[in-house]
Amino acid sequence: MRRQRIRARTSPLVIVGRLLTFLFAVALIWYGAMTVLIALKVSPSTVNSISGYRTAYNYLAGLTPHDVDGSTTRAIIAGVGILAFLVFGYLALKAIPRPHFARHDLVLAADGRGEITVEPRAIERLAETAAQQDPAITGATGRYGEGDLTVNVTVRRARGLAGNLRHTQHRVTRALEQHELPILPVNVTLASYDRRHRRELN
């Protein structure tokens, strides 16, 4: 069985997760710098006025069970904890990549009696054959994805490269039309130069 190419879907919420990670990293760097200042014998009062680390420590160290006593206070703390768990858990879940198959059969027609499909490799082979009809192209590799067709080509020389890539794109598009296949966006990419013609690049 041939290996399928896969792609990973990402959610826009990944940006929020990265922003929170960035802010947390900045906080770690900032208070790490405060630790360095204290190690360099900078006045603790000066460091505390910049970062407020001692004020925060004294406040947290001074908390007692009586400070969180009462059903209302405990309910608020529990609610905030559950909300934070749900929000951060959801962001972490959205940050997990979701791979999916990038190649799939192209359905040309379907009715109650069945459907007509074209395998991805057939479309890729058609594009490769059409691209290699140009004498300037020594090799081509097609890749059919979701809604587009990419052709990586190897050329003989750098001279006239833009024109060769443009002609290859038109040639592949015309081949799709001739075989009555849906017209897909065709992306032609230079993959490499033919090593046997490397001297011509000088």
Image: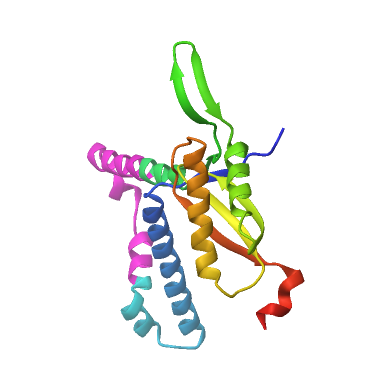
Q: Quadrant of residue 168?
A: bottom right
What's the residue at 50%, 67% (across, down)?
163
Q: Indicate left or right for 71 with 46 as reference.
A: left
What's the residue at 62%, 49% (across, down)?
128
Percent of width and height locating residue 52: 33, 73
Q: Indicate left or right for 201 with 90 as reference.
A: right
What's the residue at 45%, 44% (across, down)?
184
Q: Quadrant of the C terminus?
A: bottom right
Percent of width and height locating residue 45: 35, 83
| Residue at the extreme right of the image, as rendered | 196
Does any portion of residue 61 appear in the rendered image? yes
Q: Magenta includes 66? A: yes
Q: How many marks?
A: 0
Q: Indicate left or right for 32 with 126 as reference.
A: left
Q: Quadrant of the N terminus?
A: top right
Q: Is residue 193 above or below residue 182?
A: below
Does any portion of residue 96 appear in the rendered image? no
Percent of width and height locating residue 117: 53, 27
Q: Main secondary structure of the magenta part?
A: helix
What's the residue at 43%, 44% (across, down)?
94
Q: Is residue 100 above or below residue 30?
A: above
| Residue at the extreme left of the image, as rendered | 72
Q: Indicate left or right for 102 with 111 as reference.
A: right
Give the image's coloring scheme.
rainbow
Q: Magenta includes 69? A: yes
Percent of width and height locating residue 147: 45, 42
Q: Is residue 46 above or below residue 75?
A: below
| Residue at the extreme top of the image, as rendered | 113
The span shown in magenta is 55-84
Q: Quadrant of residue 118?
A: top right
